Amino acid sequence: MLTETITDKLKIQTGSLSDYKKLSKYHYRDSRLGPFEKIFIVKLNGHIAGVIVYSMAVPYVALRNVATNNYFAGLSRRVLISLVNKNVRTISRVIVEPRFRGLGLATRLVKQTMPLMNVPVVEALAVMGHINPFFEKAGMTAYTAPLSAGCIRMKEAFSLVGIEDEMLIDTDIVQERIKRLSSGGKLFIERELQEFLQNYGKRKNMAPGFKRIQYVLSKLTARPVYYIWFNKSLIEHESTNTQNHKQK
């Protein structure tokens, strides 16, 4: 009953950049915020309990095409940018002040503000989506990108020397397992690590050691989840406009 009493007092309203900055230190990313379109906050007794930031969407997102059955595919870059700018907004931040966590505020912020953006599509990308699926609780649909061929090969290489998936979240364990390998096993993993890092720019020259293993594991375990929500009241109208764009 206490939770119901508190949440009944929460009011969502338009916020500002200064409101965001008050809570930015609680986000896992740095506090710098790029261009944004809209900020909403939720207040309790005069205190900002949570904030959500909406930004313009980037033109191309692979999983957006998957989620929309290639709705935005097959267009020139100029038409694509115009279409995305008109129809899609991205949730770039959702932050809840620690004292107010556990009340479902993140879900409420997302669910109640998405319709206010007045666009057919709202999307989000979240590294921690599997851990705290509040986007799904708010009505968004989740899509997870498949692992790249390089990541699959690296995971298989680890498995061949006894380093299984459940160990890949702990750098210390993986590092210790590698140290215990035979000389042949160490040589095999070293070749695979070098091959894997060829696709990561300057990282391909990382020296062997803890930091290199930590970086490789971050690539094997970090799979951002793409979320999408459709404003059904606007979809039919925008679908007609899109077809007109494609015919031009």
Image: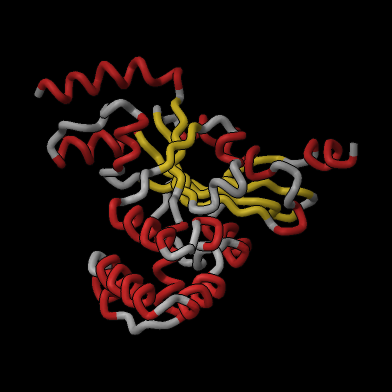
Does residue 242 sit above or below 83 in this rendering?
above
Residue depicted at 15% across the width and 33% down the height: 75
Residue 120, given in percent of the width and then of the height, sits at 40, 27
> Which residue, as the protein is rendered here, is positioned at the far right?
1
Looking at this view, is 41 or 142 the one in front? 142
Left of 112 or right of it: where is 69? left
Looking at this view, is 3 or 214 the one in front? 214
Residue 105, given in percent of the width and then of the height, sits at 68, 44
Residue 148, given in percent of the width and then of the height, sits at 31, 51
Does residue 63 sit above or below 165 in this rendering?
above
Query: Colour scheme used in the picture?
Result: secondary structure
Left of 10 or right of it: where is 4? right
Left of 192 or right of it: where is 155? right
Residue depicted at 63% across the width and 39% down the height: 107
User: Split into 4 quadrants, where in the image is the C terminus?
Assistant: top left
Looking at this view, is 51 or 139 the one in front? 139
Does residue 9 sit above or below 160 in this rendering?
above
Residue depicted at 20% across the width and 19% down the height: 243
How many numbered markers are drawn?
0
Residue depicted at 40% across the width and 20% down the height: 234
> Which residue, as the protein is rendered here, is positioned at the far left?
248
User: Split into 4 quadrants, where in the image is the N terminus?
Assistant: top right
